[in-house]
Image: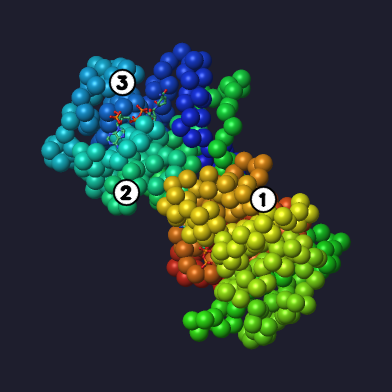
Amino acid sequence: MQRLSRTSAWPVHGRQGIQVLEAQLQACSPIPLMGKAGLATAQLALALAPYAQRIWVAAGPGNNGGDGLEAAMHLHQWGKAVRVSLLGKAQNLPADAHAAWQRAQAAGVQINSELPASWLEDMGPLDLCIDALLGMGATRPLSCEMQTWVQAINRCPAPVLAIDLPTGLNPESGQLLGDATDTALLVQADHTLTFIAAKAGLFMGHGRDACGQIWLDCLGFRDGISVPPPQALLNDSKPRPIKRHASHKGSHGDVAIIGGEAMAAHGMGMTGAAVLAATAALHAGAGRVILSLLSGQHAESVPPDLMQREWQRLDLEKLHVVCGCGGGQTVQSVMAEVLRRSGQLVLDADGLNAVAQDDKLQVGLRQRTDAQPTVITPHPLEAARLLNISTTEVQSDRLKAAQNLADQLRCTVVLKGSGTVIAAPGQTPRINTSGNGRLAIGGTGDVLAGLIGARMAQGLGAFDAACTAAAQHGQLADDWPPNKALTASRLAQRLA
Ligand SMILES: NC(=O)C1=CN([C@@H]2O[C@H](COP(=O)(O)OP(=O)(O)OC[C@H]3O[C@@H](n4cnc5c(N)ncnc54)[C@H](OP(=O)(O)O)[C@@H]3O)[C@@H](O)[C@H]2O)[C@@H](O)CC1
Ligand SMILES: Nc1ncnc2c1ncn2[C@@H]1O[C@H](COP(=O)(O)OP(=O)(O)O)[C@@H](O)[C@H]1O
Ligand SMILES: [K+]
């Protein structure tokens, strides 16, 4: 069993991949995998709450419930007061889970079909709750009874350990089952012990809030097992480029930020986004950073280290261009040239909206050569516009949406949001695990775009630059002092 850390590129599998692995693991295991899963759950419960005496296991009608029954048996045998609430009839349990129920009964575990309200008074306050209601078999919206049980778990003041995944979570998308929107229908766990392999939904959307700390038990994985291609890898945080002694400002690349329409049609200046991207590139260590405001004006009160120049005077072929941050409508008029000439390119926000609205610009983006690496950084709505689908469709399969965009537009894609996905043609997508809801404020995306530009300028390829930048951007937010406001400008200044 391992605590999932950010230092390894763990493979992520969907239902099919898990089934293939499961069949092979079962074939070479003398005991049912459920026995291993139940024992691992009980061991983790003991490690997490060594002084827990009163433990409630909410067991569902399938094999996830079977894991819970196995765990209950071990915890009972180790001297804990364990109660199992079984949702459904024991005779309807699948074979392995039924065998687990028989063993638990024979060992003397108290199993009934009541929620704690009816028996809590005799038992005293609970010390731990184990969510064994639903796992990988969860495909449809929660039944009414299941909803009541999920709410009972969430009302329980004790810490919650979810088996395989928190009940109510779609393990592939990280959305709620059946596209529900009420997060009361999702178990909020403190820890989740997942089996065989990581699943994408644990790291995206609601998964990040619901899982708590994630643990993985591969249930006896060993060499010789043939592993299907993973859907994705977790994005491990890579070291940043090192600046060598024998270097000069020209060695670290020139970044140009094109954006910041001065007065948009609605009368608001939008220079802030471009300044944020430029500040981020500067602090991330780009050799030189040039700010090109689309108004043609010079911005006041920007760091003195920034150079300012009209975009028409930029030597685009030699530059690492970050285009679109606060570009408004004006950016449309520069896009064709930026796409054709920029040496390396990061395209964000209004630059992406311009491409979505214009087929010719899409062709221009696709036609960029291998010598002109490109990263696009859409949030889900921008990705939806580019793919001509709804945001809900993007969010229901973020891995597929990012890969489709990468293949269609022949570039690296950073699909932002909770569980940022980095995809590129011919690459296994990465799911970024750093970052949190404090980043959900205006301007942090501009900081990310500038950071990617700086990493490309320092010599990383487009995909590596995107992965490294996403990991660092999220990590900064994770390390942010809880009592200090996180703002985009402070984030940009904390980069190194
Ligand atoms: N197989 C193995 O080797 C191993 C499996 N392992 C464990 O098994 C888990 C997968 O087990 P599983 O396939 O039985 O599915 P599971 O999540 O228990 O749910 C199925 C039951 O729930 C019901 N149900 C579904 N959705 C519902 C809803 N929304 N609301 C209400 N009910 C709903 C569904 O009913 P149905 O839809 O069929 O009518 C069926 O009765 C996996 O996550 C891991 O924990 C480990 O032991 C390792 C080895
Ligand atoms: N809940 C979240 N968890 C992790 N990262 C998030 C979350 N919400 C937003 N982010 C990150 O914050 C940034 C927001 O970017 P974006 O939506 O483009 O905003 P803006 O254009 O205002 O800068 C992205 O890097 C995104 O991945
Ligand atoms: K569960």
Q: Where is residue 269 in the image (x, y as percent from the top left)?
A: 55, 82
Viewer-nearest of discs 3 and 1 = 1
The answer to which of marks 2 and 1 sits earlier in the sequence is: 2
Q: Is residue 415 above or below residue 190?
A: below
Please name the residue shown 76% across and 65% down the image.
341
Write down the quadrant of residue 80 in the picture. top left
Ligand 1 lies under 8 Å from the Cβ of mark 2: no
Residue 262 or 438: which is nearer the viewer? 262
Q: In this view, does 110 lie to the left or right of 312?
A: left
Q: Count the labels in the image.
A: 3
Kindly identify the amino acid type of the residue bearing the numbered disc 3: Pro
Q: Residue 180 carries which label?
A: 2
Write down the quadrant of residue 307 in the picture. bottom right
Q: Where is residue 467 in the image (x, y as percent from the top left)?
A: 63, 51
Say which element carries label 3: loop
* Residue 476 in sight here: no
Q: In this view, does 196 lie above or below 183?
A: above
The answer to which of marks 3 and 1 sits earlier in the sequence is: 3
The answer to which of marks 3 and 2 sits earlier in the sequence is: 3
Q: Is residue 463 above or below residue 131?
A: below
